[in-house]
Amino acid sequence: MRAGLAAAPAPRKGRVRLLLARHGEALANEQGVLCGGGSDSELTALGRLQAERLAEELTVGCPELRLDVVGSSPLRRAAASAEAVARRFPGVERLALEDLREMAYGTLEGARIADVRGEMAAVAQRWRSGQTDHCVGGAGESPEDVARRALRAVAGLLESRAGQTVLLVCHSWVIKALVASVVPSIGLPRLLDVPQRNCAVSILDFRCGEAGIVSERFEVLGVDLVASGGPVAEGRL
């Protein structure tokens, strides 16, 4: 991560920097079951170690980094990962945002991945074909549902935070939907192409104005940074 996050240029005046991180490994990940917004799985021992390593990279690896806000989904796997970072930044504002929950899987919540691999592949194909309003598991969510609420959370949080740096610890599909939505060269139908490993970080800079950040320019400085920098792109929120 140091080659990406530590090497990133300082935010330009009037920008707010957003760091998006996925939680550490959860027990459901280890067990090979679908773990969506309706599953409150805890971190494994490896997941706790990953969260501590993330915290170390954000402090020791980036000694000049100052975090103003550490936010997360209310689910335990994200909240515990965020707490590991928040402990390294005394006085940081700590928030839990309901709209950052993982995608709801409907009837597939908690299913063994090996048992529903074919069904999930069919869902993924529909998304790739442009049917991003198609929901998982009947009563679950679609990529459009997830993107809509995640963008709402981000816009509401960042619009008055020019000059600040915000870390949000959330979930794979949430981050994929956010990045795919705001980068025109990706687009929501290709959200599966956005990598997002446990405790990897994506960096986005937003420009705040009188109208907030909606429709304002932003820069994606890196995606899925663990040991090296990611692509650089521009888009709109």
Image (cartoon, rainbow, N blue to C red):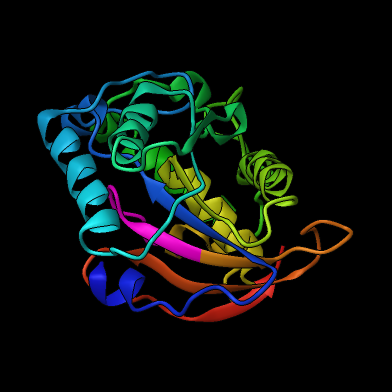
**Foreground pick, 118 / 206:** 206
Q: What percent of the width, then of the height, locates residue 9? A: 45, 80
Q: Which residue is found at the position 64% from the left and 60% from the top? A: 181
Q: Quadrant of the C terminus?
A: bottom right
Q: What percent of the width, then of the height, locates residue 155? A: 72, 49
* In this picture, residue 170 sits left or right of residue 87: right
Query: Measured along the vertical axis of the image, is residue 13 above or below residue 87?
Result: below
Q: Can residue 129 be seen in this view?
A: no
Residue 156 sits inside the magenta stretch: no
Query: Measured along the vertical axis of the image, is residue 223 above or below residue 177?
Result: below
**Majority secondary structure of magenta residues:** loop
Q: Which residue is found at the position 31% from the left and 41% from the top? A: 85
Q: Quadrant of the N terminus?
A: bottom left
* In this picture, residue 124 sits left or right of residue 14: left
Q: What percent of the width, then of the height, locates residue 130? A: 65, 59
Farthest front residue in view: 91
**Foreground pick, 233 / 137:** 233
* In this picture, residue 93 sits left or right of residue 23: right
**Foreground pick, 93 / 77:** 93
Start-end of magenta stretch: 194-203
* In this picture, residue 171 sits left or right of residue 55: right
Q: Which residue is found at the position 39% from the left and 28% from the top? A: 79
Residue 197 sits inside the magenta stretch: yes
